[in-house]
Amino acid sequence: MASKKLRRAGVSPQVCELLKRHRVESCQDLLSLSPLEVMRLAGLSHQRALSLLRSVSTHCAPPVATLLELWKPTSESFFSTSLPALDRLLRGGLPRGTITEVAGPSGCGKTQMCVMLSVLATLPSSLGGLDAAVVYIDTEAAFSAQRLVGMAQARFPHHFSSRERLLQMAGRVHVFRELTCQDILNSLPGNLATRSNLLSHQASVLKYLAHRFNIPVVLTNQITTHLGNTGSEAPGQADSGFVTAALGNTWSHTVNTRLIVQYGDGRQRQIVIAKSPVAPYAVLNYTIQQEGIRLHEGGNQEPMGETGDPVLQPIRVRTEFNYSLSRPAETDGYR
């Protein structure tokens, strides 16, 4: 909170510009000054300097909520995924004001999930949507406008039966394709500590935006493979590999909810609730259809880990490494 820029704390642009000339740009910078120093740097009266310090201090203070307020969530606390089984486990849907991560191997449906959520966010509240706009940052050139429109028409045929509603929905989805993953990697310094600090800073910005505007922030993440004996194989068995979400432990503590998508058997795939403050560890089967994600009854509710609490073990997307090398044949045409 203290690293928040002054302009985000409600300080006027004129005062921000005066303070910036003296390298006072964050709330921490300002609050480390005395009222007399603020008067001199910003050209304010004593009363206005005190008022400015109080205002910035209030913006930096973390919000306080009673247990009763947290115990009785409202409809504004969650964003429905339109997947009843998943919403029930998550106590209403994706939590608003927090970061949700969807991680998994290529072709499992991460993009399809994001496209579907984009459609849902633009829907009126009467249909379970947020009646809001969407910022879609595409770093893999995977976003398809045709797919979004087709999914909207297939999932909500009555609502999007008119061209006017389709155009209104499409106008609310803002797609940014300025950077690719490789561009971002090339721009990062080589020092690991510096990269970790930069990642933490970006995470704090996303958390601020999510909390400040009470919006759901959904990110996708790739996976990384660990080879060799993991210590759980019986003697004489071949070494196996497992894959886990990328970006390491620092990032894993940043996200509030983590959903793992992985390949199942045949056409089916699985959504794993790997991390959630409200939901149990669970596995749901799904397929990708023209209308987007479709859950199927009878999903495996058993933990994937062999022993112990699955939260304390590596998140395995596959128990055998050969699954990462060969993928089931795609028959539905969507990835």
Image (cartoon, grey):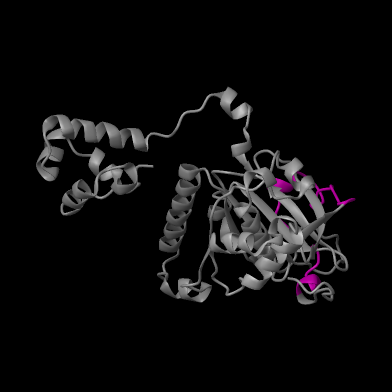
Q: Nearer the viewer, residue 89 or 114?
A: 114
Instruction: Name the residue located 59 percent from the left edge and 29 percent from the top edge.
Output: 70
Residue 328 location (% of width, % of height): 84, 73
Instruction: Answer above or below: position of 74 versus 165.
Output: above
47 left or right of 286 in image: left
Of the pair 327 and 325, the residue shown nearer to us: 327
At a point 55% along the width and 68% down the height, the residue shown is 138
Q: Position of residue 278 (x, y in %)?
A: 68, 38
Residue 23 located left or right of residue 322 = left
> Is residue 298 highlighted in magenta?
yes
Give how far across and how far down residue 192 sits, in percent: 45, 64
| Residue 209 colored in magenta in the image | no
Residue interval drawn in magenta:
297-324
**Residue 317 appearing in the image:** no
Q: Is residue 293 left or right of residue 198?
A: right
Q: Residue at x 79, y 74 (%)?
A: 333
